[in-house]
Image (spheres, helix red, strand yellow):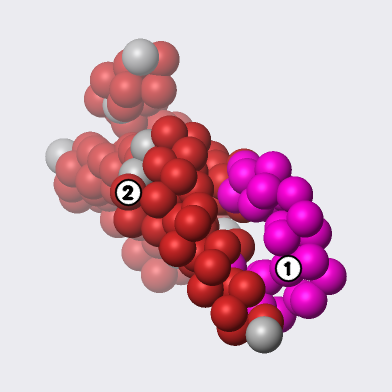
Amino acid sequence: MRERDIHHLFVTYYPALKSFAERLVKSSETAEDIVQDVFLRLWEKPSALEEAKANSAYLYQMVRFKAIDYLRREKFMDNAIRNYVANLAEEEEEAYLEEEVYRRMDEAIDTLPPGVRSVLTLSLKGHSAKEVAEMLDIAVETVKKQKQIARRMLRERLVKILLIFVH
């Protein structure tokens, strides 16, 4: 009996329900899925079937609610995808800037005079001024002076990097 009732409702209302759903979701395939879900619900829930048999507006209401749920999910997914793409672009930009800063730093360090470059390189590796002096067999004061020279020269050469961050 239930099968016959569902079949009757399906034959009678399917085209109109599909058209109604299609106007809401703007997709023929999605409209078909929505209407099929409604009829599946009628099959699974006898009380819904009885309500639909008694009042055809109930079918339209079920389609409308399914369509609204679909549109909400689509909007949520669309927003999630947009946010993901925006974050990805932002992360890529940050990664590019970071790589560019390191590349320019390396270039600038390579242009330093050999003694200054040696002192700076060892200092950047975490060695103290005393350790650098011992390693290079120079005075601690010379290490300090070489580091000052390195900072001044790098500052002059790396001003362009600051412009990347300003724009």
Q: Residue at x 69, y 43 (%)?
A: 57
Which quarter of the rendered picture does the C terminus lie within? top left
Location of mark 1 (residue): 49
Q: Residue at x 73, y 68 (%)?
A: 49
Instruction: Residue 9: give x, y in percent of width and height.
Output: 56, 63
Location of the N terminus by quadrant is bottom right
Comparing 164 with 55, the one in front is 55
Decide: few, some or many residues near mark 2? Use Cα within 10 Å; few <14, some 14-19, many ≥20. some
Q: Compared to 82, does 124 lie above or below? A: below
Q: CA distance from mark 2 to mark 1?
A: 24 Å
Q: Is residue 94 visible?
A: no
> Does the rendering let one see residue 45?
yes
Q: Return the x and y of residue 5 as percentages of the image width and height.
A: 62, 73
Q: Secondary structure at mark 2?
A: helix
Counting from the top left corner in percent of width and height, residue 84 is at 46, 47
Q: Secondary structure at mark 1?
A: helix
Sequence-first tag of 2 and 1: 2
Residue type for callout 2 = Ser
Q: Is residue 137 depicted above or below 71 in this figure?
A: below
User: Does 83 appear above or below 120?
Assistant: above
Which residue type does callout 1 highlight? Leu
44 in the magenta segment = yes
Magenta stretch containing residue 35, yes or no? no
Mark 2 = which residue?
Answer: 28
* Labels 2, 1: front one: 1
- Answer left or right for 141 relative to 88: right
Counting the numbered discs, the total is 2
Residue at horizontal 32%, vertical 22%?
164
Depth check: give the residue in front, 148 or 13.
13
Stretch in magenta: 39-65
Picture quadrant of residue 43: bottom right
